[in-house]
Amino acid sequence: MAEIKPTASVKATSVQPKKSSNIISWLAPIICVIAGYLIWRYIFGNPDNFEVKGKGWFWPKHDKPHHDKPLAGIYMGGIIVPILVGMFLMVLTFSIERYLTIRKALGAGSISDFVRKIQYHLANRNIDAALSECDKQRGSVGNVMKAGLRRYKEMINEGGLNTDQKVIAIQKEVEEATALELPMLQKNLVFLSTITSVGTLVALLGTVLGMIRSFSALGTDAGGSGTSALAIGISEALYNTALGIGTSAISLIMYNIFTTKIDSITYGIDESGFTLTQSFASLYK
């Protein structure tokens, strides 16, 4: 029977899960929709904007908006308008939230310059200086690099593993640190990607509903008054289209900006892992 040699065990990862609140993910959409309704109801639907003031609390049927009150025309777009306004507020909210998060994740300086500094310190076998650079850089790349460097430093004096096993241990530490960093970067981007496609569909729904009301008015009224009602109704319905397309366009632009930033951070993390493993394999054979 072949003799089985015991192998030294590698310590569990030193990377700790990040604690983060998910309250904005479910609270912000509710607040934004409510705020959208209040803007539509009390700003766009201000009774002073109309010649004929309707009654009712939830949806007063105001009519004949003043020509010098452009917001009144948006109110006439119907009950879909507050949903579209709420979606626009969601785009603003999650864009600000993602901007602050990704800006923090980018760290204090250029990622490429940071990686070059780490490579220089590793080439000179100065691990403490490399760790100090991580403290200065911070951000996702700095956090992953710091976790990998700690395991790197441990593996230098580890006598129970061969070089390949040590490299695998360093690589595993980097992968586990990366697995904790990336979800924080991609969090809440789903709202922007969803609004990009759904915003146009909701706007189309509002436009169709407005067209139905317009043609209904044309069918019940006779003569020139019906044609006038149709023209006014079409213009009001198109407010839904304009709001939806504008919201979707802004959401798409912000989504692409953030994903590009995340890709640059991901590339920096991959480069960090490669730097650590290649450095250890070449210097500590």
Image (cartoon, grey):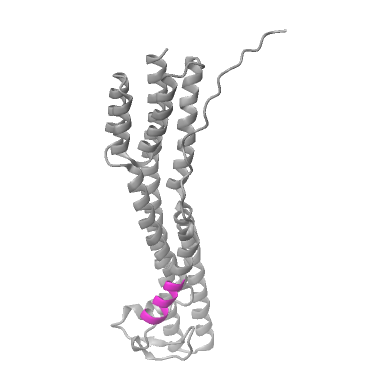
Relative image position of residue 229 (x, y in whole percent): 44, 84
Q: Main secondary structure of the magenta part?
A: helix
Q: Residue at x 48, y 20 (%)?
A: 166
Q: Nearer the viewer, residue 104 or 84?
A: 104
Q: Is 160 situated above or below 140?
A: above
* Quarter where residue 91 is shown: bottom left
Seen in the image, is 65 located left or right of residue 22? left
Q: Residue at x 30, y 23 (%)?
A: 126
Relative image position of residue 51 (x, y in whole percent): 36, 91
Relative image position of residue 284 (x, y in whole percent): 40, 14
Q: Is 142 situated above or below 117?
A: below
Q: How many numbered circles are shown? A: 0
Q: Nearer the viewer, residue 158 or 266?
A: 158
Q: Is residue 127 magenta?
A: no
Q: Is residue 38 magenta?
A: yes
| Quadrant in which the C terminus appears | top left
Q: What segment carries the magenta color?
A: 34-43
Q: Nearer the viewer, residue 223 or 104?
A: 104
The residue most toward the right is: 1
Relative image position of residue 43 (x, y in whole percent): 36, 80
Seen in the image, is 269 located left or right of residue 30? left
| Quadrant in which the N terminus appears | top right
Q: Nearer the viewer, residue 148 or 110?
A: 148
Q: Is 24 situated above or below 213?
A: above
